[in-house]
Image (cartoon, rainbow, N blue to C red):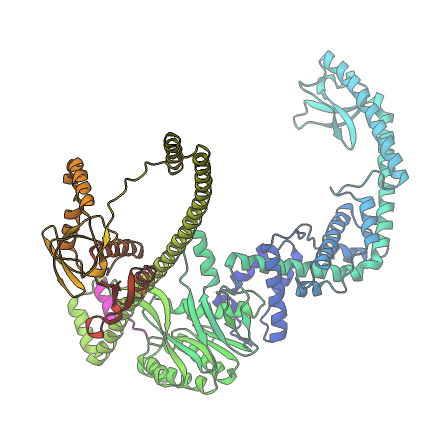
Amino acid sequence: MIYPQTFEQKIGFQQVRERLSELCLSQLGRHYVQKMQFQPRADELKKLLLQTDEFRQLLNAGADFPSQYYHDVHPHLLRAQLPGAFLEVAAFFQIKMSLRTIREALTFFTQAPEGLYPTLRLLGIGVQADRNLLLALDKVVDDEGHVRDDATPLLRQLRQELINRQGILRRSIADVLRKARSEGWTPEGAEPTIRGGRLVLPIVAEHKRRIKGLIHDESATGQTVYIEPEAVFELNNDIKDLENAWHRELVRILISLTDQLRPHIPDLRRAYQFLGLLDFVRAKARLAQQLEAVLPRLHPRPLIRWEQARHPLLYLNFKEQGREVVPLDLELTPEQRILVISGPNAGGKSVAMKTVGLVQYMLQCGLLISVREGSEAGVFDDIFLDIGDEQSLENDLSTYSSHLTHMKQFLLLANKRSLVLIDEFGTGTEPVLGGAIAEAVLSELNRVRAFGVITTHYTNLKNLAERTPGLVNGAMRYDPKHLQPLYRLETGKPGSSFALEIARKIGLPKTIVERASQLVGKEKVRYDRLLEELEAEKAQLEKRSAEAEKNERRMKKLAQEYQELKNHVEETRQDVIREAKQKAKLLLKDTNAQIEATIQEIRTAGAEKEQTKAARQKLDSFVQKELKTELPKPRGTREVADPKALKPGDKVALIGQEGYGELVGLKGNTAEVLFGGLKTIVKVAQLEKVTRSEIREREKEAARKAPASEARSGSNMDVTGRMAGFSTTLDLRGERAEDALQRVMNYVDDAIMLGVPELKFIHGRGNGVLRQVVRDYLHSQRAVASVADEHADRGGDGVTVAVLK
């Protein structure tokens, strides 16, 4: 049941009907638009919705479905039922083209893949569009709506004779016109014309006696008369006779064709019912496209669980203006049936309530609804609406009396399958009494387990919803700082009217606002202020939540970039190693071949000195060519440091390093070494002894590169300087993953060179990206003996400790 009778006008559905009618291709579809009504049966409703959704998919896929010639031929069929009557050529043209559309639609669904458009396919069951009838129509009427010249042999003969006679007539009258022009008897630019179905010449009135013939007409001024020359009397008569004969033959053909059509009228009615349904469903699908509407998951019981619901008409209007509608998330379930919406005036309460009514009514009329995919919807038996001012002078009803009349009907008829929509509940009378009656009515609606959406400003209704199971508060969000509505619905808390704040913004005198605050009472002001503070805190929380989500997305992106970088480095490393091994293998092969050739050459020469020297030079040249560089000068042999053989004053170097220093003292397995001016304690196992020859070579090289050494730190001074400024702790907090990895790589290289035994990396906890980067790299280095967390008192897993070999 839908209450009141003006429901569609009040909720805005009449405008939806008008849009649907505009989208129809014919009166056939518009007829179904007008018949469309509320459907409370879930099985029938599901079928209607599936039809619309399948046609929407058909349109979205760009399928080649017929979209022309949806003609309403019911008046022609009524005429054709009368014995002896016949249809005109235009009527047969409409029947032919629309029958062709019907056959194409049936063929489309028949040839569609199995399982595609199953509900639409069912519409065509039992529909017949006789192929022989279509061929008979096509034989008489062409695709332009004209009678075919070869419809019958006699018609073709008459048409041919008519064309011949008309050609002779034009030539004859052209001769007469030529003479009349030469004599000056015709007006300037005169041409033959038709009067009374006969070809005539325009002649100046004062010369009308100069041409023998019949005067058929004259101009409005009387200065020109239209004469049929005597020379063409017979030709015009012959043409008239042929036209009459042609028309008689055409009528005979049309009568015969109508007789052939008459037995098919019952089948044709069913076929055009099918065509009208297709037009109607197509219009619903087109509307769904415009609304970006979808088919929700349908339940047979009452339920509303909508996400991103938009008011359809508001959405279309805003779309034309380039604006966006603020969507609503709404849920009405058996446990939370009635939503009590409060908030400031012009904050969107009524629009939210109308959105619920219009969207649910559209759904139960078989239309897809403007919600997000995945939304759920149920089926109601009744929708009751109370909205607007319905004063009636005729029935002596005030606004409040009208509201009470509606409440009476709601209480009598509403049940657990009803949806009740009430706007500004309780208004129209003294607030205390109006609020009390509204609270009693709301309690009774909740008792019968009705569903509903109610808008109000009354605090007692908000309190009732807060403490009563089955009721839930909802608030239209408002910006208390700028006093602007946000048009967003939030379920679970009441809204404030912000009356005093709006009064201040408008500029009402301060004394008036303060007096109003005193009159309303401290409790009410404190209640509204609490709601205002909650609104501000909610906005701040949403802002922080959005920032947190943004940072989380950023960190995920960085982690992904790091992983991709790591994978790339690993892939590149493997490629480089593979390529180097391949080159080394080829070089080794060539080198071995050259060595064997050199040995063979020396043996063949009998190991003579000159030949041996030449062979060695040839081998050196080959090596230089292959390596594309000069052969390195042999470095002085270093002796592995032996703790027993070492003594203060010996020159030593760190294993693998070029710089060297002087041994100062020994203590067991540790040594005190002076690098430049800095003493360092290192393990003896990390030292090697530097020979005198190598020291001399180093001094010569240093003297040769003195200018360059001044520009950059030399070997000894470089080591000394870096050891002086080296810290065993590296702070990486706040670094990007790529930058941190580069710093760690450089830092570990320096530590290994300087012989530092232990390192600490401060990266913090966070989401663990930096910790993972640091530890992945440390585990990949052979010089690192172990990797572990720092002691819990000194940072725990926020600090990584690495011990070097």
| Residue shown at the point (82%, 25%) measured from the top left | 167
Q: Please give the count of numbered marks on the rendered protein.
A: 0
Magenta span: predominant SS is helix
At x 51%, y 59%, the residue is 292
Q: Is residue 394 visible?
A: yes
Q: Is residue 594 above or below residue 399?
A: above
Measured as percent of width and height from the top left, residue 145 is found at 75, 43
Residue 407 location, quadrant: bottom left
Q: Nearer the viewer, residue 212 or 574?
A: 574
Pick whichever, 329 or 555, lies toward us.
555
Residue 474 at x, y percent in the picture: 37, 74
Residue 68, percent across and down? 67, 50
Identify the magenta region: 495-505
Residue 505: horizontal and vertical position, in percent?
22, 63
Q: Residue furthest left?
A: 677
Please name whichever residue, 750 or 797, is drawn nearer the observer in this view of the structure.
Answer: 750
Q: Is 171 drawn above or below residue 793 in the view shown? A: above
Instruction: Judge left or right: residue 780 versus residue 377.
Output: left
Taking the magenta stretch, the answer to whether it contains residue 162 is no
270 to the left or right of 554: right
Q: Is residue 85 visible?
A: no
Quarter holding the N terminus?
Answer: bottom right
Q: Pick the residue in front: 530 or 341.
A: 530
Q: Quadrant of the C terminus?
A: bottom left
Residue 176 occupies which quadrant of the picture?
A: top right
